[in-house]
Amino acid sequence: MPGAPIKIGYSLSLSGGLAANGQTARLAHEIWQERVNARGGLLGRQVQLVCVDDRSDAAAVTGVYESLLSEEKVDLLLGGYGNNSISPAMPIAIEHGKYLVGLMGLGVNIEFAYDRFFAMIPTGTDPNSALTAGFFAVAAKQTPLPKTVAIVAADAPFSKNPILGARANAVANGLEVVSETKYPLTTTDFGPFLDEAQQSSPDILFYCAYLNDSIGLIRAIADSDLDPTLVGGAMIGPQASAVQTQLGPALNGIVNYEYWLPTAAMNFPGVGELIADYQQHARGTSADALGYYVAPFAYAQLQVLEQAIEATGGLEDDALAEFTRSSTFSTVVGDVTFGRLGEWSVPRVLTVQFRGIGSSDIAEFAKPEARVVVAPTSYASGELAVTYRTAAGLR
């Protein structure tokens, strides 16, 4: 009805294993809501975000979205954070023909090929490969040239796509994957899994992990006698302040992916102000202290929705989707256009190396030089320091 708030419904993992990133996204969304409503809302109506905690439980997501449509009577849906929250929502969105912009879902739409889905993630039209393309390209430029790769990954659905991409990137760069070791998500002692990987004496130790297991894997390699050239690759964890403050200097030498960092090359219009606002709001909350990884993309996610609504002058899902497919959006993470499966048309994944971290104080990680961007060249802030133990200060 005219004058009533525009209700946008979605789930986020505000508790459970993915809560650190879910809380961060929620805070960035709230900042957007405050700003847009202060400007008069959208279409002359205030905006109400209806966010439900899915508890990091993929099995709960379907029920959340069914309830949002049938009970909350939301006008629009929004996708949650990551595959865990987005993939289970896809069948509901498809059934109801809903426009859906998700946050950092890697390869979610490969299975569905749904033409009303879009993802705020800079992994391009080949997301599996893009996530670790820089990691393997940089590895292939080292002297002496690494030859072998051992994969150590969580035995969980989220690791499937990054592993496929890692294998393809290894082959493309003349590297051989000599082993693949899977561990249960309940693992607390990672030593035996590294011992298994070490049997092949790999030059590169490729990790694919969530937040808590990233901590265990990084501590395990630091405490071991393994001496690979490169360690890291596809860990969801080192980007988070909670992980950074637990590991501190143990992160030195680790090479991993990022999507945005406060470097001169990525100082897009509005992003500095957003980060400053976000960090002020984050004090004393469970959200990430710095917000570099999730906050800019969560805010940009709603900027896309906002610009589509304003351009089409309504809330019709088909019109919003058609506009989004063919338009360029001006966001705090730069200009964004979407490709055939709804992910960014041009990839922009950063490969970074942690260096020079002297303590567990979060201020150490706020410094741009704490994560040296080694790829792609257009955003690089330095070169890779090898080997892992040299960069980590362990020799």
Image: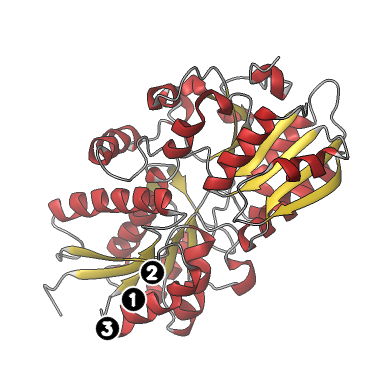
The answer to whether marks 2 and 1 mark residues whose Cβ atoms lie closer than 8 Å is: yes
Mark 2 burial class by Cα count in 10 Å: few <14, some 14-19, many 20+ = many
Q: Label 1 amino acid?
A: Glu
Q: Residue at x 88, y 34 (%)?
A: 147
Q: Label 2 amino acid?
A: Leu
Is 104 displayed left or right of 395 in the figure?
A: left
Nearest the eye: 76 or 315? 76
Q: Quadrant of residue 50?
A: bottom left
Q: Quadrant of residue 305?
A: bottom left
Is 124 displayed left or right of 85 in the figure?
A: right
Helix, strand or loop at mark 2: helix
Mark 3 burial class by Cα count in 10 Å: few <14, some 14-19, many 20+ = few
Q: Label 3 amino acid?
A: Glu
Residue at which label 2 appears: 320
Nearest the eye: 315 or 170? 170
Calculate the distance from the C-alpha at mark 2 to the C-alpha at mark 3.
23 Å
Is 146 displayed left or right of 157 in the figure?
A: right
Helix, strand or loop at mark 1: loop
Residue at which label 3 appears: 71
Q: Is residue 355 above or below residue 62?
A: above
Q: Which mark is residue 316?
A: 1
Q: Is residue 14 above or below residue 170?
A: below
Q: Residue at x 68, y 58 (%)?
A: 155
Q: Residue at x 43, y 63 (%)?
A: 101
Helix, strand or loop at mark 3: loop
Sequence-wise, the earlier of marks 1 and 3 is 3
Nearest the eye: 214 or 167? 214
Q: Is residue 9 visible?
A: yes
| Colour scheme in use | secondary structure
Q: Residue furthest left?
A: 3
Is 38 displayed left or right of 174 in the figure?
A: left
